[in-house]
Image: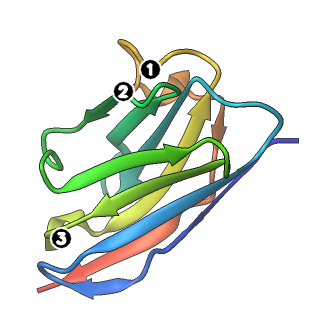
Amino acid sequence: QVQLVESGGTSVQTGESLRLSCRVFAYGDFACMGWFRQAPGKEREEVAGIDIGGITNYADSVKGRFTISRDNAKNTLYLQMNSLKPEDTAMYYCAAKYGVCSGSWSKEMSYNYWGQGTQVTVSS
């Protein structure tokens, strides 16, 4: 049984940093993993994706501020978030899929597994 467990979400002030983690309980590695977020009253949106080789993709809204990484040996996905803004407030979800990231990292329907989410709140 595959399980993704996020952690690290909390309340911070504008400009601060935060690192989210996603522990993956599964046999083998997923070709593509991603972070998505959903703010109150809005649809879930892509944040970042990373393939098994370390190639990354980012939404324009987080480029230059967020960094996605993965430690395959520890079965853990990370999201380093710097210069946080109030508009980054959301529930953050990690996701994993067997298919490659290329061309589809931002398509949530392409992901096979999802975590339960971790809340990030940024206040001004």
- How far apart, in angstroms, are the residues tagged by discs 2 and 1? 9 Å
Q: Quadrant of the N terminus?
A: top right
Q: Which mark is residue 84?
A: 3
Q: Are marks 2 and 1 in contact (CB under 8 Å)?
A: yes
Instruction: Identify which amino acid the numbered label 1 is placed on.
Output: Cys
N-term mark: 2 or 1: 2
* 64 on left or right of 109: left
Front: mark 2 or 3: 2
Q: Secondary structure at mark 2?
A: loop
Which residue: 47% across, 25% down? 53
Q: Residue at x 35, y 46 (%)?
A: 43
Circle 1 crowding by C-alpha within 10 Å: few under 14, some 14–19, many from 20: many
Q: Counting other residues with Cα less than 10 Å from the Cα at mark 3, is it few (<14), some (14-19), or many (20 or more)?
A: many
- Local secondary structure at mark 3: loop
**Residue 105 quadrant:** top left
Q: Which residue is mark 2?
A: 55
User: Colour mode?
Assistant: rainbow
Identify the image quadrant of residue 80: bottom left
First in sequence, mark 1 or 3: give its number: 3
Query: 19 or 92: nearer the eye?
Result: 19
Residue 115 coordinates in the image, percent (x, y): 63, 52
Give the residue at x 62% y 59%.
Answer: 116
- Give residue 110's position: percent from left, percent from top: 53, 21
Residue 83, located in which quarter of the rendered image? bottom left
Reply above or below: 43 against 6: above
The residue beneath circle 1 is 101
